[in-house]
Amino acid sequence: MLLLSKKQDWLGNTRADILAGLVVALALIPEAIAFSIIAGVDPKVGLYASFCIAVTTAIVGGRAGMISAATGAMALLMVTLVKEHGLEYLLATTLLTGAIQIIAGYLKLGSLMRFVSRSVVTGFVNALAILIFMAQLPELTNVTWHVYVMTLSGLGIIYLFPLIPVIGKSIPSPLVCIIVLTAIALMVKLDIRTVGDMGELPDTLPVFLWPDVPLTMETLKIIFPYAVPLAIVGLLESLMTATIVDDLTDTDSDKNRECKGQGIANIGSGLMGGMAGCAMIGQSVINIKSGGRGRLSTLLAGILLLIMVVFLDDWISRIPMAALVAVMIMVSIGTFNWGSFRDLKEHPLSSNLVMIMTVLVVVWTHNLALGVFVGVLLASLFFANKISHLMYVESEYDEDSDTRTYHVVGQVFFSSADKFIAAFDFKEAVEKIVIDLNRAHFWDITSVSSLDKAVIKLRRQGAEVELIGLNEASSTIIDRFGVHDKPEEIEKIMGGH
């Protein structure tokens, strides 16, 4: 069964994976060069990284069909490090980033993705689509009219070519776009920006390279503050991208294995002279839209990238940037969740606010981790507020026995603790009070403290207080942290009054 699964991952979609891998390799080249420039390093650092990371994650990653390479989100975090300490410290940081991500995988931190709500994922996707589009604008400003014609022609090919019977479905339209526009640019001898203008392509294969830094605590102090955010952003973007590819392909992926895979890939990249990277939503969408589903497409994307930039650099450098801009605009259009506009009317206000704030924070700061953090925090606060409203207390009075019974229903925790206390009448003079907790659950120390206060105040009015119906989990936390049955602690909680 395992062997069949492995075979399906690698050879279950061979022809489509090969073509998709070629398209992705072409799309990776300008991106890797651009991200190297952002980070302040030689273009070959980004290109070697993209090769190493793509090939490694194809083999050890947890999500077939997902593309990982050098990314803009990671490059932005490296700028200060490269400027102040140089390339060697960047390579050392990349190794430490990988080690942290492997540890995260073994700690099963990938499972934390279940705490990220659908609204946060939608906001993340929409923000990335906007960022991908914005990244193309420099190629479309202060340029000649030829660039606009070429870009629009590229988009026309991408969207219309699949409508051609038979051949339209067998060859990925982004690949046709790149080939056709390159041929036109060469034949007409158009003077427009090409891949070669982005930076010099490497002419040698990557070699094993141990970072030339001293193995001291001083070095660790320098690289650790950069490695931690790199590891977090890398895992966040990779796990979010894996979730999106899961949805696009209607398949599941192993998030903890993905954490380990990304870590191993970054260690490999650092040892081959590359920078740290992670999953790329844009290239992953290109891969899926081009028919790539298996690990073969990711492996070939990395291998073909290296072959093209090292051995076919004369041809690759002539590809007009307009062709690749058209492909990336297609990616941004395909990535954006257009249904989210319709959902604004149907979804609750809290869900809409979470989605919109995630988009705004990511686009404004270009920090994916910060955007997701804000989204998750807001979603958690809204959820806590909603659950607190579902907690209520009913009471009944038995005149014969002079007993007041309070029936507590729902979840008692930090958000509903004040509401719980407010439900009791501390001025009523009765002989006995029963607090029925059959349908209640106490979650945290705040809820236990609120129960203590209620019981102690009621007893101070001269009533006998009895708790009934505590479930085992609530009883455990109350026994451990509660003080209403510990006379020596009562004065402390009441503040001595």
Image (cartoon, grey):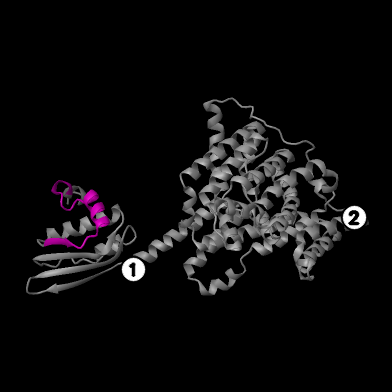
Question: Residue 401, image x and y in percent?
Answer: 7, 71
Is residue 493 left or right of 72 when viewed as pictured? left
Q: Kindly identify the residue that appears in the image at 72 percent across and 62 percent down.
A: 330
Residue 278, relative to residue 226: is it above or below?
below
Residue 453, visible in the rendered structure: yes
What residue would you read off at disc 2? 190
Q: Mark 2 or mark 1: which comes first in sequence?
A: 2
Q: Judging from the image, what secondary structure is the residue with disc 1 in?
A: loop
Label 2 Cα neighbours within 10 Å, binned few <14 / some 14-19 / many ≥20: few
Q: Which residues are magenta?
A: 464-489
In the depicted structure, whether residue 151 falls above or below residue 193? below
Name the residue carrying label 1. 390
**Looking at the image, which residue is at 27% across and 56% down?**
473
Q: Is residue 468 magenta?
A: yes
Above or below — where is 85 with respect to 484? above
**Residue 66 visible in image:** no
- Residue 307: horizontal and vertical position, in percent? 77, 43
Residue 373: x and y in percent read 50, 53
**Quarter holding residue 400:** bottom left
Tell me the number on the disc at residue 313: none
> Label 1 neighbourhood size at 10 Å, few (<14), some (14-19), many (20+)?
few
Q: Secondary structure at mark 2?
A: loop
**Number of labelled discs?**
2
Q: CA distance from mark 2 to mark 1?
A: 67 Å
Q: Position of residue 280 (x, y in %)?
A: 64, 52
Amino acid carrying mark 1 in the image: Leu
Quarter holding residue 386: bottom left
Disc 2 marks a residue whose amino acid type is Leu
Inspect the magenta stretch and tell me whether residue 139 lies in it: no
Left or right: 309 with respect to 440?
right
Q: Who is closer to the viewer here, 104 or 457?
A: 104
Which quadrant of the figure contains the N terminus? bottom right
